[in-house]
Image (tube, rainbow, N blue to C red):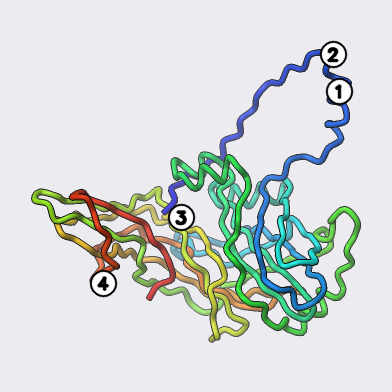
């Protein structure tokens, strides 16, 4: 579980350089600026001799209180690209107005969609990355991402056959020197498909030891964010596979929780809104099913998680995923 607020902190520090050092540092002024974040991953064996990696940054639109703050869709303009000749890559995403807008709309968290095209096949993965300390709001993993600006992505799913429209778009892409292909790369736009659904979702688990007097309070606050898995399929009805993760805010502003007594071993559930989207454009054609809005409630679930030994103390651990 992540906690964030919709503010981005920008720190500005002064730098004093002594005159004798100015000549020695002059070459560094021409060096490339530090990327906003570096994404590294493995996609396994490439179907062809090379592959094109395109990084897109999500920008939601059309979310209002009337529709439970569920986005009507997302613009996913490309913010970086790279040609690779092996199954591993490390790509730097530069600072840009496009990325800054995505971070602002994500309350300090950028939602990246990384696509890899190789021959007539492709794979993709979504990953949220915290890029501001205020967006992390105390979350250890988020603070580490905001500080290091380097993220190792989970291994990508297996390559799938590209739809015909995607193959034509990829063939028409002319790779320019300096990695500027994204300037001409068509945007991938996702549009809501069918109606959203409210589903009780497993958002954590509570383990309380059996010692006398032990109890624990589980709370899901209005400021909480939750990272859930994203389902992806080439057709609206499947087959489906896991395609990374997406972070949703507790946008409805509710609080919810419960008190667990001694010898409790239970999941914590909360109501989440899910929406299916169709991704269309010259370089994409597929569907995702993803959590997009949290109600903010939390109740003790009826299913029992695997037991964890405790040393006579209360213990809570966080696990998130697709609804059952």
The quadrant of the rendering that contains the N terminus is bottom left
Q: Spatial distance from mark 2 to mark 1, Cα to Cα?
A: 8 Å
Comparing marks 4 and 2, which lies closer to the viewer? 2
Label 4: few (<14), some (14–19) or many (≥20) C-alpha neighbours in 10 Å? few
The quarter of the picture where residue 308 lies is bottom left
- Mark 3 crowd level (few <14, some 14–19, many ≥20, 10 Å Cα): many
User: Residue 255, position in %: x, y?
Assistant: 31, 52
Q: CA distance from mark 3 to mark 2?
A: 51 Å
Which residue is identified by label 1? 24
| Residue identified by numbered label 3 | 249
Q: Residue at x 20, y 55 (%)?
A: 208
- Badge 2 vs badge 1, beta-carbon distance below 8 Å: yes
> Between marks 4 and 3, how big is the CA–CA gap?
25 Å
Residue behind mark 2: 20
Of all residues shown, which one is farthest toward the left? 212
Residue at the (53%, 41%) spot, across then down? 7
At 57% from the left and 52% from the top, the residue drawn is: 129
User: Where does the image place residue 244, in percent across and percent down from the top left?
Assistant: 55, 66
Q: Is residue 183 left or right of residue 95?
A: right
- Asked if the residues shown at circle 1 and circle 3 are in contact, with their CB atoms under 8 angstroms apart, the answer is no
**Residue that numbered label 4 is attached to:** 303
Report the Cα–Cα distance between label 1 and label 3: 47 Å
In the image, taking residue 6 as reference, residue 111 lies left or right, namely right
Position of residue 260 relative to residue 237, above or below, is above
Q: In the rendered view, would you say 32 is above or below 304?
A: above
**Which sits earlier in the primary sequence, circle 1 or circle 4?**
1
**Disc 3 vs disc 2: Cβ atoms closer than 8 Å?**
no
């Amino acid at each position: 579980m992540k906690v964030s607020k919709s503010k981005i902190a920008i720190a500005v520090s002064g730098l004093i350089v002594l005159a004798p050092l100015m000549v020695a540092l002059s070459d560094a002024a021409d060096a490339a600026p530090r990327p906003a974040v570096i994404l590294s991953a493995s996609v396994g064996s490439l179907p062809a001799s090379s592959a094109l990696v395109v990084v897109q940054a999500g920008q939601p639109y059309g979310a209002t209180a009337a529709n439970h703050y569920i986005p009507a869709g997302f613009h996913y303009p490309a913010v970086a690209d790279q040609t690779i000749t092996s199954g591993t890559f490390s790509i730097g995403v530069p600072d840009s107005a496009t990325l800054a807008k995505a971070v602002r709309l994500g309350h300090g968290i950028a939602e990246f969609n990384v696509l890899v095209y190789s021959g007539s096949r492709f794979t993709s993965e979504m990953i949220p990355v915290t890029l501001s300390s205020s967006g992390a709001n105390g979350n250890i993993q988020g603070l580490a991402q905001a500080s290091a600006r380097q993220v190792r992505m989970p291994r990508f799913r297996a390559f799938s056959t590209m739809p015909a429209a995607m193959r034509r778009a990829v063939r028409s892409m002319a790779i320019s020197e300096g990695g500027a292909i994204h300037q001409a790369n068509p945007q991938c736009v996702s549009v809501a498909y069918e109606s959203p659904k409210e589903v009780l979702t497993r958002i954590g688990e509570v383990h309380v030891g059996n010692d006398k007097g032990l109890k624990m309070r589980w709370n899901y606050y209005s400021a909480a964010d939750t990272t859930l898995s994203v389902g992806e399929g080439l057709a609206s009805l499947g087959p489906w596979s896991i395609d990374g993760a997406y972070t949703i805010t507790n946008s409805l502003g509710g609080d919810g929780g419960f008190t667990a007594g001694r010898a409790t071993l239970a999941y914590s559930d909360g109501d989440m809104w899910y929406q299916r989207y169709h991704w269309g454009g010259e370089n994409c054609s597929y569907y995702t099913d993803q959590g997009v809005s949290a109600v903010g409630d939390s109740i003790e679930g009826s299913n029992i998680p695997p037991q964890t030994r405790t040393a006579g103390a209360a213990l809570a651990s966080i696990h998130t995923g697709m609804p059952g």
